[in-house]
Image: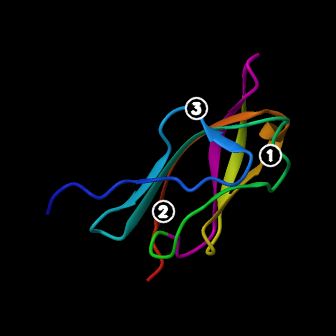
């Protein structure tokens, strides 16, 4: 039992990394995803998809998680939602910002 394989987060068009963004799964059926992302232009839109996790790394149930949004003038708390299709979507008051950071742990689908 060694360390898990870590993969680059597959980003949607118009999204880039601020720093390393990745995902992996553990041997106890947990998924982990880290995103430190920004828009190449403009700001996030509500429910905008920023990445999609591949099959085998998707959650059993959709969940909404706390995220930190930034536009260079300060942080705002918002949310990311990860659904059963593996879509990572932006939400909440942070959608008027152009950068986001999140760390999420969830139960993997069977």
Q: Which residue is the site of mark 2? A: 106
Residue identified by numbered label 1: 92
Residue at the extreme top of the image, as rendered: 73
Q: Is residue 10 found left or right of 39 in the rendered image?
A: left
Q: Nearer the viewer, residue 59 or 15?
A: 15
Give the x, y percent position of residue 73. 76, 16
Name the spot of residue 63 as percent of width and height, x first: 62, 63
Task: Work out how far the residue at label 1 is from the one at label 3, CA to CA, in angstroms.
Answer: 21 Å
Give whichever of 39, 34 is nearer the camera: 39
Q: Which residue occupies the foreground of this view, 99 or 63?
A: 99
Give the residues in magenta. 58-75
Q: Which residue is drawn at the image coordinates 31% and 63% (left, top)? A: 26
Which residue is the site of mark 3? 18
Quadrant in the rendering for residue 97: top right
10 Å crowding of disc 2: few (<14), some (14-19), many (20+)? many
Residue at image position (79%, 54%) is: 48
- Structure colour scheme: rainbow
Q: CA distance from mark 3 to mark 2?
A: 23 Å
Q: Label 1, secondary structure: give it.
A: helix
Q: Find numbered disc 3 in the image and state the secondary structure of the residue it sits on.
A: loop
Q: Is residue 67 magenta?
A: yes
The relative height of residue 31 versus residue 97 in the rendered view (above or below) is below
């Amino acid at each position: 039992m060694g360390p898990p394989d870590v993969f680059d987060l597959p980003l949607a068009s118009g999204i880039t990394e601020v720093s390393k963004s990745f995902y992996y799964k553990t041997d106890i059926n947990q998924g982990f995803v880290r995103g430190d992302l920004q828009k190449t232009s403009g700001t996030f839109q509500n429910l905008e998809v920023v990445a999609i996790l591949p099959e085998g790394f998707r959650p059993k149930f959709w969940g909404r998680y706390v995220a930190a949004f930034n536009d260079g003038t300060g942080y705002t708390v918002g949310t990311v939602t990860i659904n059963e299709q593996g879509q990572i979507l932006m939400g909440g008051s942070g959608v008027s910002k152009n950068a986001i950071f999140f760390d999420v742990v969830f139960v993997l689908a069977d």
